[in-house]
Structures are given as structure tokens and as C-alpha cells.
């Protein structure tokens, strides 16, 4: 029984960590996308 609860806890920890990493990845991806769009927008404005 102890081994099972330990295993379940480990899986839960891994799942939570994965979720946090996915959320971070999405946030970083969105920020990078915004930064790139902003740079493209600015360069287009400067050089029509």
C-alpha cells in the first residue's frame, strides 16, 4: 500500500510539474510572438 501511495504522489507531482511547464511555455511563446509582431510592425512603419 505504501508503495502505491508513493507512486500516485510521484505521478501527481510529475503531472503538476508538466502542467506548470506547459503554461510557462505557452506564456513565453505568446510573449515572443508579440515581440516579433511588434518588431515587424515597427520595421514596416519605418520602411514602407
Image (cartoon, rainbow, N blue to C red):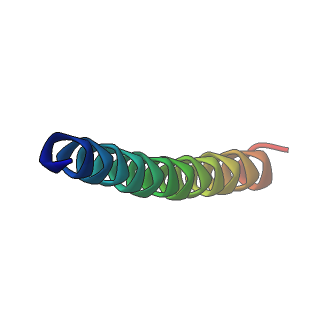
Where residue 41 appears, x then y in whole percent? 75, 53
Where residue 2 appears, x then y in whole percent? 14, 49
The C terminus: image quadrant = top right
Outermost residue on the right side: it is 48
- Compared across the picture, whether 43 is left or right of 20 comes to right
Q: Quadrant of residue 20?
A: bottom left
- Compared across the picture, whether 30 is left or right of 21 comes to right
* 32 in relation to 38, above or below: above
Outermost residue on the front side: it is 1
Task: Please tell me which residue is depicted at 43% across the width and 55% down the height of the picture.
Answer: 24
- Compared across the picture, whether 34 is left or right of 5 comes to right
Task: Please tell me which residue is depicted at 61% across the width and 45% down the height of the picture.
Answer: 36
* 38 in relation to 43, above or below: below
Where residue 11 appears, x then y in whole percent? 34, 43
Depth check: give the residue in front, 24 or 41.
24
Where residue 9 appears, x then y in whole percent? 26, 53
Q: Quadrant of residue 30?
A: bottom right
* 14 in relation to 13, above or below: above
Task: Please tell me which residue is depicted at 33% across the width and 51% down the height of the picture.
Answer: 17
Depth check: give the residue in front, 10 or 1.
1
Amino acid at each position: 500500500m505504501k508503495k502505491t501511495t508513493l507512486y500516485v504522489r510521484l505521478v501527481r507531482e510529475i503531472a503538476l510539474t508538466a502542467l506548470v511547464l506547459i503554461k510557462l511555455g505557452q506564456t513565453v511563446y505568446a510573449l515572443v510572438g508579440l515581440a516579433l509582431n511588434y518588431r515587424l510592425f515597427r520595421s514596416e512603419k519605418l520602411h514602407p
